[in-house]
C-alpha cells in the first residue's frame, strides 16, 4: 500500500500518527509499537551499465504465461511511461522466444536441407525427394490436430523438438515406398503395377513400424512413470509432465502422416504419368461442354421474363 502525503508531512514522524481501530476506538500505534530507525543496506543492480529493477511473478494454475504476458503488454502500451524507462519481459518468455527462434529459424530448416541433399543423391529425382519431404508437413499438421484433440498446449521447446525428431521418423515410410517403387520400375514393371505392388509389399512393415513406435510412447503420453527396481507405477510425476508434449507430438504426427502416406504417396507417384496422358484439347472440350450444359440448366429454370429470347 502506497500512501502519498502532502509534501510538508513527508517524514518518518508521520508513522507515529497512525491509529489502529480497536474495541475502545482508535488507538495511536505508538501505544504498542516502538519505532526505531536503523540503516538499511540496499543494492543497486545494473545490466550492461543500465540500472535494472526486476519484478518476478508466477501465474496461477490453468493460466498460460503467454496469455498473461500479452495482457501485461497491452496494459503497458496504454501507459504513459517516461522515454528513459525501458520495459522488457524476461524469464520464461525470453527463453521461449530464443527457443522459437532457434527451432524455427535454424534447426528445422537445416534438418530439412540435410535430408533433401541425402534424398537427392540417393534417388536422383527432385519430385521423389519433394514427395518424401512432404510427409514432414503432414506430420506437423498431425501434431497440431493432436494438441487440439487432447486439449494440450503446444510447448515450444518440447513440442518443437518433437516435430524435428518426427521429421526424421516419418520420412522413413516414404523412403521405403519410393525405394521399392523405383526398384520395381527397373525390373520392368509398368508404373501402375509398380505402384500396386509397392503398396501391397510395404503396407505391413510401414504399419508395424508406426504401431510399435506409438505404443512405445503411450506411457509417456499418459504421464506414466515405471520404476522397475521398486516396481512402482506413478501417473503425473514431474518427468511425465515434462515429456508429455514431446511424446504427444510424435504419436499424433506419426499416426496422421502414416495414414496419409499409405494413401497419398501411391497417388502422387502416378500423378506425373497421368498428367502426360491428358490431352489439353480434350480437357478444354470437356470444360466447354460442361459449361454449356450448366448454362442450359439455369436458362431452362429462369423466369420467363428474364429468359433470353430463342434464336
Image (cartoon, rainbow, N blue to C red):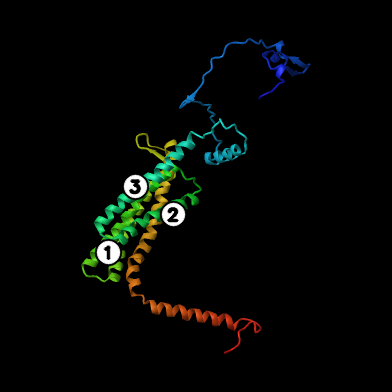
Front tag of 3 and 2: 3
- Which quadrant: the C terminus? bottom right
Mark closer to the chain start, 1 or 3: 3
Q: Indicate which disc, 3 or 2, sits on the residue closer to the N terminus.
A: 3
Q: Nearer the viewer, mark 1 or mark 3?
A: 3
Q: Secondary structure at mark 2?
A: helix
Observer-nearest of 64 and 241? 64
Q: Is residue 60 above or below residue 251?
A: above
Of 136 and 151, which appears nearest the observer?
Answer: 136
Cα distance, mark 1 to mark 3? 28 Å
Q: Tag on residue 213?
A: none
Badge number at residue 181: 1
* The label number, if any, that marks residue 141 in the structure image: 2
Q: Quadrant of residue 161?
A: top left
The quarter of the picture where residue 200 lies is bottom left
Query: In the depicted view, which residue is nearer to us: 50 or 111?
Result: 50
Helix, strand or loop status at disc 1: helix
**In what quadrant of the picture does the N terminus appear?**
top right
Amino acid at each position: 500500500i502506497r500512501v502519498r502525503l502532502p509534501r510538508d508531512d513527508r517524514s518518518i514522524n508521520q508513522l507515529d500518527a497512525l491509529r489502529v481501530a480497536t474495541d475502545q476506538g482508535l488507538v495511536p500505534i505508538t501505544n504498542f509499537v516502538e519505532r526505531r530507525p536503523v540503516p538499511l543496506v540496499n543494492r543497486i543492480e545494473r545490466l550492461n551499465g543500465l540500472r535494472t529493477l526486476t519484478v518476478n511473478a508466477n501465474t496461477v494454475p490453468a493460466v498460460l504465461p503467454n496469455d498473461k504476458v500479452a495482457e501485461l503488454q497491452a496494459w503497458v502500451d496504454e501507459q504513459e511511461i517516461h522515454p528513459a524507462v525501458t520495459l522488457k519481459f524476461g524469464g520464461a518468455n525470453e527463453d521461449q522466444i530464443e527457443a522459437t527462434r532457434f527451432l524455427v529459424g535454424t534447426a528445422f530448416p537445416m534438418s530439412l536441407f540435410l535430408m533433401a541433399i541425402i534424398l537427392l543423391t540417393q534417388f536422383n529425382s527432385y519430385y521423389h525427394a519433394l514427395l518424401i519431404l512432404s510427409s514432414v508437413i503432414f506430420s506437423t499438421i498431425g501434431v497440431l490436430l493432436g494438441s487440439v484433440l487432447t486439449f494440450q498446449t503446444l510447448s515450444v521447446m518440447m513440442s518443437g523438438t518433437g516435430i524435428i525428431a518426427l521429421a526424421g521418423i516419418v520420412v522413413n515410410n516414404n523412403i521405403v515406398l519410393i525405394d521399392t517403387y523405383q526398384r520395381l520400375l527397373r525390373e520392368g514393371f509398368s508404373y501402375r503395377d509398380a505402384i500396386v505392388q509397392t503398396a501391397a509389399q510395404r503396407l505391413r512393415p510401414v504399419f508395424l513400424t508406426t504401431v510399435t513406435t506409438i505404443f512405445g510412447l503411450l506411457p509417456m503420453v499418459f504421464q506414466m512413470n515405471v520404476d522397475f527396481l521398486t516396481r512402482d507405477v506413478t501417473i503425473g510425476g514431474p518427468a511425465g509432465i515434462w515429456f508429455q508434449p514431446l511424446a504427444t507430438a510424435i504419436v499424433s504426427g506419426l499416426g496422421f502422416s502414416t495414414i496419409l502416406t499409405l494413401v497419398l504417396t501411391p497417388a502422387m507417384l502416378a500423378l506425373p504419368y497421368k498428367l502426360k496422358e491428358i490431352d489439353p484439347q480434350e480437357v478444354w472440350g470437356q470444360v466447354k461442354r460442361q459449361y454449356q450444359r450448366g448454362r442450359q440448366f439455369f436458362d431452362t429454370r429462369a423466369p420467363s421474363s428474364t429468359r433470353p429470347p430463342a434464336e
